[in-house]
Amino acid sequence: MYKKEISKAVINRLPRYYRYLSDLLEKDVVRISSKELSERMNVTASQIRQDLNNFGGFGQQGYGYNVEYLHSEIAKILGLDRIYNLIIIGAGNLGQALANYADFERRGFHVSGIFDVNPRLKGLSIRGIEIMMMEELESFVKENSIDIAAITVPKSKAPQLAQELVNMGIKAIWNFAPTDLHLPKEVTVENVHLSDSLMKLSYRISERDKA
Amino acid sequence: MYKKEISKAVINRLPRYYRYLSDLLEKDVVRISSKELSERMNVTASQIRQDLNNFGGFGQQGYGYNVEYLHSEIAKILGLDRIYNLIIIGAGNLGQALANYADFERRGFHVSGIFDVNPRLKGLSIRGIEIMMMEELESFVKENSIDIAAITVPKSKAPQLAQELVNMGIKAIWNFAPTDLHLPKEVTVENVHLSDSLMKLSYRISERDKA
DNA sequence: TAGATTGTTAATCGATTAACAATC
DNA sequence: TAGATTGTTAATCGATTAACAATC
């Protein structure tokens, strides 16, 4: 059977649905209609129903959606029903910030190792995870089952590092370097371009100030 | 005269154009055609020309685009032709990482102050900027001309803090807390939801592994 | 049952791509 | 001038919204 490809726009919205449902769950809300959720999220009810029906019929006519059920279904869709082993390359401020962010751990993203070139960081540990040197990276990746590598090294080092990681067998990269990585299509790259984000902000500020 | 609204999709792509043009500039490339740029960026040449022509005719038939000129024009469009004063609320790992990221400074985003509730951080400084206590925030904002507030406090504190910042007259927020801020529409909010980004990655990993 | 709300089809709207005349 | 490539219009494609029959 032919399965329709899910559009990127839909995937981008899924984490946001998940976030709102997590909040509702915390507030012990049992059921919610697409209309009520749409008002909270500032989207159309139609869009919510269309989006969800890409994955299945999670609601019930006349009732709406059971919050707990829908939450757990979206978790499954997002692949949050398993543990991911993550390594962080670059133990600068940003790398350390990620390593310290316990929330990721709660969601199933386990920081397995942190690496840096700076010998002065050798032996230091973050949340009990010792910073390792880059020489140890390859054997570490080979001996551990690493699902994701977060790249928090300077822009100039990122492309080569990414290629090396791919050569070591890494299949998913969370890229924080302000550059695009050109890698084989079977490698999944998710970019966090903070400088792009900041420029979008300055664009909107200067647009607003023009008016 | 009626000026057509620029679509969000176009604005999202502008920083990426800017990034590629910066790279070309650094490599001393003088001119580039939409076709060549499209190949580097993995988009269609048509899209590049359409996008740019929202803002003006920056190219020349038979020649293409002058890299330096186009770069500087996009900088202007993005509002990068001025200085922005930025404060960071929350001097945890992420706040410190932002404060330390000198690249922003280079682009005209000046870190004016860093604030935290933790008295143990009092007096500590990052890149010469002393961490201040939250009690000092209001007077600091009033005495300095602050353009942007970066929120790097925990989720639970973010909505109230955002409201307070707005009350103090802040008009643009760079939000790193994993929650949406519901603020008056005249306030510009740019979100960096790292957990959303990580979930998109896990979605794609689990999709790939299914196949 | 009557009312509410989904799932889904159809209509609309917007964004991307193709095509080509204009022009450097 | 001839060739290249833009700027721009038209065609296509995709995403969002509206509408409503199905059904809980």
Image (tube, coloured by chain):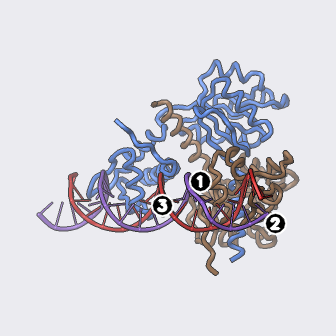
Chain colours: A brown, B blue, C red, D purple
In the picture, measured across the screen, residue B87 lies left or right of residue B76, that is right
Q: Secondary structure under badge 3? A: helix
Closer to the eye: label 1 or 3: 3
Q: How many marks?
A: 3
A154, A187: nearer the viewer: A187
Of all chains, the one bearing label 2 is A
Circle nearer the N terminus (2, 1): 2
Residue named by callout 1: A155
Q: Is residue B133 above or below residue A160?
A: above
- Outermost residue toward the bottom? A1
Please tell me the numbered disc located at residue B113: none
Inter-mark Cα distance, 2 to 1:
31 Å
Residue A8 visible somewhere in the drawing: yes
Amino acid marked by disc 1: Lys
Residue named by callout 2: A82
Residue named by callout 3: B41
Pinpoint residue A37: horizontal percent, then vertical percent.
Answer: 71, 49
What is the quadrant of residue D20 in the picture? bottom right
